[in-house]
Image (cartoon, rainbow, N blue to C red):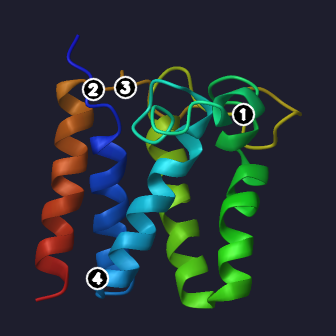
Amino acid sequence: MFQLKGYTHLAAGIAAGYILSGTPAGMIAAGAGALLPDLDTPHSMLGSKIPLLSVIGGGHRGWMHSFIGLAVFSLPVYLYNPQAGYAVATGCITHLVLDMLNPSGVKLFWPFGRHRHILGIPSSSIIANLAVTVLVLFAAFERR
């Protein structure tokens, strides 16, 4: 099946950053935040650039796909620049929500509990891509 390799997460993060901040900096920070949880796999957009980080990620959809990962990625940025920290957190949250739409889900309270999913839509399916397209279009018209 055709894999988008992070472009869906990137588009959703940028769109969310645009809706919340309307600034290029907010869009970039949210887009980056949307890619960070997948550092836990060497096959992701960022993980392929920094493959050693996948070792500390503990496997795909481990701690980096949880509230712990959200804090690890966004809190240091927030301490340096609160607006950028909120944008990174927004991007991470869009990633988690999108991953919760497919059957694998995420373990939000890692290491406790189980993987949770919302709808069971397979990644890179037509429905998933349409959902992100609608989000991007909504973002484009929201700021008008």
Left or right of 71: which side holds 21?
left
Mark 2–mark 1 Cα distance, whole angstroms, equals 23 Å
Residue 130 versus residue 58: which sits nearer the camera?
Answer: 58
Q: Which residue is mark 4?
A: 24
Residue 2 versus residue 130: which sits nearer the camera?
Answer: 2
Q: Which residue is mark 3?
A: 121
Task: Tell which circle, 2 or 4, labels the residue nearer the N-terminal end.
Answer: 4
Q: Three-letter amino acid code at disc 1?
A: Gly
Residue 57: mark in rendering? 1
Mark 2–mark 4 Cα distance, whole angstroms, equals 27 Å
Residue 124: mark in rendering? 2
In percent of width and height, residue 10 lies at: 33, 52
Secondary structure under tag 1 reads loop
Q: Do callouts 4 and 1 mark residues in contact (Cβ within 8 Å)? A: no
| Crowd around label 1: few <14 · some 14–19 · many ≥20 (10 Å) | many
Residue mark closest to the camera, 3 vs 2: 2
Q: Residue lying farthest right?
A: 112
Secondary structure under tag 2 reads loop
Mark 4–mark 1 Cα distance, whole angstroms, equals 29 Å
